[in-house]
Amino acid sequence: MSSKQPPAETGRNDFIRAMVVSDLESGKYGGRVATRFPPEPNGYLHIGHAKSICLNFGIAEEFGGTCNLRYDDTNPETEDERFADAMAEDIRWLGYEWTQKLHASDCFEQMYEWAEQMIREGKAYVDSQTLDEMRASRGTVTEPGRNSPYRDRAVEENLDLFRRMRAGEFPDGAHVLRGRADMAHPNMLMRDPLLYRIRHAHHYRTGDEWCIYPMYDYAHCLEDAIEDITHSLCTLEFRNNREVYDWVLDAVGIEHPRPEQTEFARLNLDYTVVSKRKLIQLVDGEFVDGWDDPRMPTIAGLRRRGVPPEAIRTFCDMIGVADVDGRVDYGKLEFAIRDTLNWTAPRRLCVLDPLRVVITSYPENAVEWIDAPEFPHDVGKPGSRRMPFTRELWIERADFMEEPVRKFRRLSPGVEVRLRNAYVVRCDEVVKDPATGEVVELRCTHDPDTLGANPADGRKIKGTIHWVSADHSLPCEVRLYDRLFSVPNPDDVEEGASFTDHLNPESRIVVTGARIEPAVADDPAGTRYQFERTGYFASDPVTSEPGSLVFNRIVPLRDSWAKRARVT
């Protein structure tokens, strides 16, 4: 095992790492650090899970410990192997590797034996009330609950019923196993917590071997104990569950030092929902195109959009680990993405809304291959790339204005601009469609002495625009992805409304007819770029292919939402 490093040396400092350092210094767990990431395989991992992944796997790495991937597969009705496989892929993509891959279902027999032990010791009983009756007798935060009429069943009767539950003699809901705790406890979760329920459903791993399944509060702590976990880290919504966690470990006789639960603030990201129930609603309601839709906050969606894993890890470091819930500005995630891609994404020229330009002073049928500098310099490419310059070009329609407004520094009649990496050109004539009056072509002349140089006579060129060759550029589809919701907190809805009412109608704008320089032709799908003056993009790993290029916008170059917030 590698040497332990305190947070001051790792560059990270938070209350959980301070706790780990304290435990190591005291020898509490014999110098061990063991964490786990325990997702339920009933959906896809999302950006909120990324925070927990980075925390659990990160602590194991920093302190020379272990981190298990453990599937909490105790609900056969919603879980599936494809979700488990997708989760493993996401974790590896983020840059982590587990010590062991485990399943709660591996422990079903051991958990059952502990349940029988609790029954024999009078710490658990079979309750035959209906769910509504149990709810009614639970009490309130100000009133104690009432004991179940079945609470004092004899041990032999409880054992017989529990074994018959396992044997499949009873239908769903006929009985449950409850812990005999305290129905007057101020923590309502401690009022005889449910330990087992009947579910006649096929389990994706164990098949039809079991028809009773442990509840989360019973299974989770026991799995931690079986795996010798030292620090069981979970989000704040489980804070009240900690007493049940400790009570179950006491009830089955797990001795100290043993796993201890510690809670941290979950990631609540603006303009996003991370509730798995709501993500399922988005997918099933076809509000999005599946779990890997690039607008989704799932790891699969972020990966398909083109977000690099390093950016997600950086983002999780930026927001840190707190013990109080709050909301995180979506702009921080975009900042982390831009900061990562700025140093890794090669620059390319892509025209989204093409307007034809004819350089009348340039020879017809001539092709000049311009050496354009490659940036960043360490992306594994040569120091420059070759761009074809021809008589006919495409520029962005927004880069021309026939009657320019104040401070417009792009192309207009009689005005000169520099074409990126190429010549200075002047607009001499505007050609319009006689039927609609729309500008369809610009006729320009170029200064042949300005390739890579300023005009010799000292005249100042105020604007630079991007372009592509009309003959050599490649057609492509560009998908402009934006935030999925139009309000910072989509969960904050009025009574009778739905979070889907706040979906952003412009979260995806599909641009057809865009043109991109030919240097991208042989790049593999998924390659990331900065389209100069436009944003960061990646070729879609699912639909993009040679001859039919598709690019997803990862983030724009600047946070347009911050400006919008200032205006409103």
Image (spheres, rainbow, N blue to C red):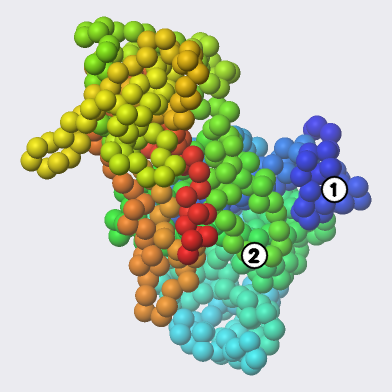
Which amino acid is tagged 2? Asp
Task: Name the residue tied to disc 1.
Answer: 21
Residue 183: quarter of image: bottom right
Towards the viewer: 318 or 407? 407
Task: Name the residue tied to disc 2.
Answer: 325
Of labels 2 and 1, the one closer to you: 2
Which amino acid is tagged 1? Val
Q: Position of residue 311 (x, y in %)?
A: 57, 39
Kind of element beneath mark 1: helix
Q: Is residue 490 visible?
A: yes
Towards the viewer: 170 or 453? 453
Q: Position of residue 449 (x, y in %)?
A: 42, 9
Report if the CB atoms under discs 2 and 1 are less than 8 Å apart.
no
Q: Residue at the right extreme? A: 26
Q: Residue at x 28, y 38 (%)?
A: 402
Give the Cα distance between marks 2 and 1. Answer: 24 Å
Q: Position of residue 434 (x, y in %)?
A: 9, 37
